[in-house]
Image (cartoon, rainbow, N blue to C red):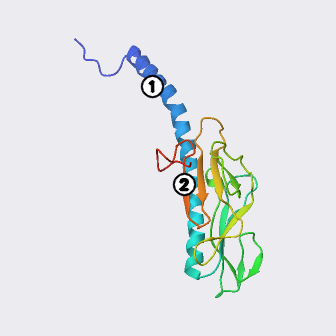
Amino acid sequence: MLKQTGVSLIELMIGLAVLGIVLAIAVPNLTAWMQNAQVRTAAESILSGIRVAREEAVRRNYQATFYLLSSSGIGDWCVDTTDVVNAANVDCHGNAATAIKTVQSWKGAQTKNARVGASTAATQNYATALAAGAGLPAQVTFNSLGRVVGAGITRIDVTSAAGSGARTLVIVISPYGLARLCDPSLSLAANPQGCA
């Protein structure tokens, strides 16, 4: 009797059929997971930028401003502070400015599916997501105590360009300068990650 050293055509076809079924189940879930990951990455980056602006204002004992730059909703942001040491700098908008220093910036195109909208309203309805590009460009300025100066951004929504079924995350900025990331689909009473 001869010993078989490979796989038969039937075994190969069964293997390919099983692989096809697994891929048909996994690909949509993988796509949704990647879109949600890009939304979270963009939201965490923006939250980081807001915190950098607040920390720089406190550290330098002067105002620092966080800017959301792109009106298309891509999520580009930048932080400017007054720099008394180096008077020849370029600000977030690319303009030569006396005593202005760009501390940090980020290009939202790194997360292709994430879109951003902003609001300056004092009260918010988290049930409805802000449209991509709404309220942009926008800014929030922090003073040397880390508090918000004047009217500025109070809410930033980060959504997916893919539309329905994708996750939305919200960044809420209090008048005291505290910023937090929350999920509008969760209730704050039941979950600390909720918005309201």
Residue type at numbered disc 1: Leu
Q: Nearer the viewer, mark 2 or mark 1?
A: 2
Residue 119, image quadrant: bottom right
Question: Residue beneath label 2, please?
Answer: 181
Q: What residue is rendered at 68% in x and 57% in y?
A: 122
> Residue 178: horizontal and vertical position, in percent?
56, 64
Earlier along the polypeptide chain: callout 2 or callout 1? Answer: 1
Residue 58, image quadrant: bottom right
Residue type at numbered disc 2: Leu
Q: What residue is rendered at 59% in x and 64% in y?
A: 49
Alpha carbon distance from label 2 to label 1: 39 Å
Question: Residue beneath label 1, please?
Answer: 19
Q: What residue is rendered at 58% in x and 54% in y?
A: 43
Above or below 109: residue 100: below
> Residue 1: horizontal and vertical position, in percent?
22, 11
Report the front residue among 55 and 86: 55
Q: What residue is rendered at 55% in x and 73% in y?
A: 55
Within 10 Å of disc 2 (Cα), the crowding (few <14, some 14-19, many 20+) is many
Above or below 161: residue 106: below
Asked whether residue 113 is in view, the answer is no
For label 2, the SS is strand
Q: Residue furthest top?
A: 1
Q: Residue 194's mark?
A: none
> Residue 112: horizontal and vertical position, in percent?
64, 48
> Residue 155: horizontal and vertical position, in percent?
65, 56
